[in-house]
Image (cartoon, rainbow, N blue to C red):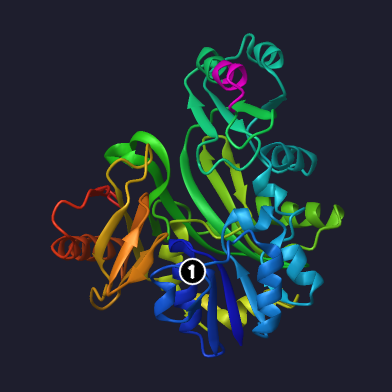
Amino acid sequence: MRILVVGGGAREDALSWRLAASPSCEVLLHAPGNAGTLTRGTNWPDVAATDARTIVRRAQEERIDLVVLGPETAIAAGVGDKLREAGIAVFGPNRSAGRLETSKVFAKRFMERHRIPTAQFKVVHNLDQARRALDGWRGGAVVKADGLAAGKGVVVCDDGGSALAVLADWYTKNKIPGGGSDVVIEERLSGREVSVFAIADGSTMIPVAAACDYKRAGDDDQGPNTGGMGAYSPPAGFPADLLDVVRERVVAPVLRGLLADGERYRGVLYCGLMQTERGLFVIEFNARWGDPETQVLMPRVDGDFARYLASAANGALETGAATWSQDACVGVVIATSRYPYENTPVSGLPADLDLGDGVVAFWGTSARENGTVSSPGGRVLTVTARAEDLAAARARAYEAIAALKTRFPSGTPLTYRGDIARL
C-alpha cells in the first residue's frame, strides 16, 4: 500500500514508524511530516495538515491507497470528508462525527442524549448565564471552552467562585480559547484517569488498548496543564476487565448513538475516562490518536498495522491483522524549558537517535538539515522504551534520556518530568 500520514508531530512520527514496519506498507508519505518521518518516507513540508484541497490533489497524483489522519485540526478542517469524496480510503472520521472532540457542547449533549456516563454539566453563552449557572454551585467545577484550543481551553477550579472568575476573564476580554462564545461548566470529578482507544470501521467499534498520560508540566502533577509530558501503557492499578467494561458502558452506546445520528465513524475513538467511587465516567472524547499516548501504544503493536487500519478505513475491520502485546511501554516527553508558557526554538540537536534495543525516540514538530535537527520549541521529543514490565520500561526510558542529554549542544534549554510511570 501507498500510505499518507497527515500531521507533523510526535504522534505522526510514531504512526509512521509503526506503519513502516508493516508488511503491506510499500510507500510512506507525510503532510507535512517532521525530522523523524523523513527517515522512512517522503515529506510534504509545504502542505499543512488542514489543507484539504492540496492533500486530495497530491494524494491522487501519488495514487495513495490509505490516508491516516493525525491531528484534530485536520479532522475539523474536513480533510477526511474531501478525501472520501475523491474515493480515497481514510482512517479518521468525517468532520461531523469529529465533533465528539471538536465541540465540547456537542460531545456533552451527545453523551446526555445517549446515556453515556459523564459529569453533570451546564452550557452557557455569556457572562450573565455563567453567573446564574454558578449561583449556589457546590464543590469543584471544570470550565471547558467549546472549540479546539490546543490544550488551553480547560480550567479545573476548586469552587464556583473560581470558575466564575475564569469565565469573567474570558468573556470580558472576549478571549475564549478556541474562539466562539459557548462554554461548558461541569462538576469536578475525583478519581484516577485512564485513556482507552477503540477502533471503528463504520459499523463496529472495539476497544483495543489503554494508557495513562501526565498533563501537568512538573513532577507530582505540579504546574500548568500541557499537551502531555509522558505516558505509559498498559495502565497499572485498573481492573483486568477494563476494556470489557468500557466496551459495555461507553463504546457500545457511543456506536449506537453515532449510527442513530446517521454517522459512519471510521478511525480511532479516544475515550478519556475517570474511575470514581461512583463508577466510570467519560471526561472527554478525542476523534484521533492521542499525544503522547500514541508514542507508547505503537511500540506495543504486533502484526500488520497498515492492513489493520486500511481494513477499518474500508469498512471491514480485520481484527486479527494487528494485536497489542502484553509488554509495557513508557514514554517521557522532552520539552523546551519554558513550555507551555512559550516555545523556545532549539537547533543543532543530534539527528541520529539510535538509543538501543527497545528504545525509540519520536520527534515533535521539527526539521532536519545538514545532519542535525531544529525545533520551534514546545514538546521536542518523546523517548519511549518497551520492556516486559513497567519498572523495566521506565528504567530503560530514563537511562536513554540520560545518554541522550550528553549529545545535546551545551546550554540547550530542555526539560522533562522525572516521575513518569513512577507508581
Left of 103 or right of it: where is 380?
Answer: left
Q: Secondary structure at mark 1?
A: loop
Q: Is residue 216 magenta?
A: no
Locate residue 79 relative to residue 296 in the image: left or right: right
Tell me the kind of residue under disc 1: Gly
Q: Nearer the viewer, residue 208 or 240?
A: 208
Is residue 299 among what the camera can see?
A: yes
Residue 34 position within the rendered picture, expressed as x and y whole percent measured from the top left: 43, 67
Please give the residue where the numbered disc 1 appears in the rendered image: 33
Eyeballing the image, is 80 above or below 38?
above
Q: Which residues are magenta?
A: 167-175
Up-down relation of residue 245 to residue 124 (above or below): below
**Residue in the foreground of this view, choosing between 203 and 74:** 74
Residue 273 in the image: x percent, y percent? Answer: 55, 46
Q: How many marks?
A: 1
- Left or right: residue 371 versus residue 180 is left
Residue at horizontal 31 percent and vertical 66 percent from the top: 373
Q: Position of residue 213 (x, y in %)?
A: 42, 50
Residue situated in front as seen by the camera: 216 or 420 = 216
* Quadrant of the image containing the N terminus: bottom right
Q: Residue at x 77, y 53 (%)?
A: 96
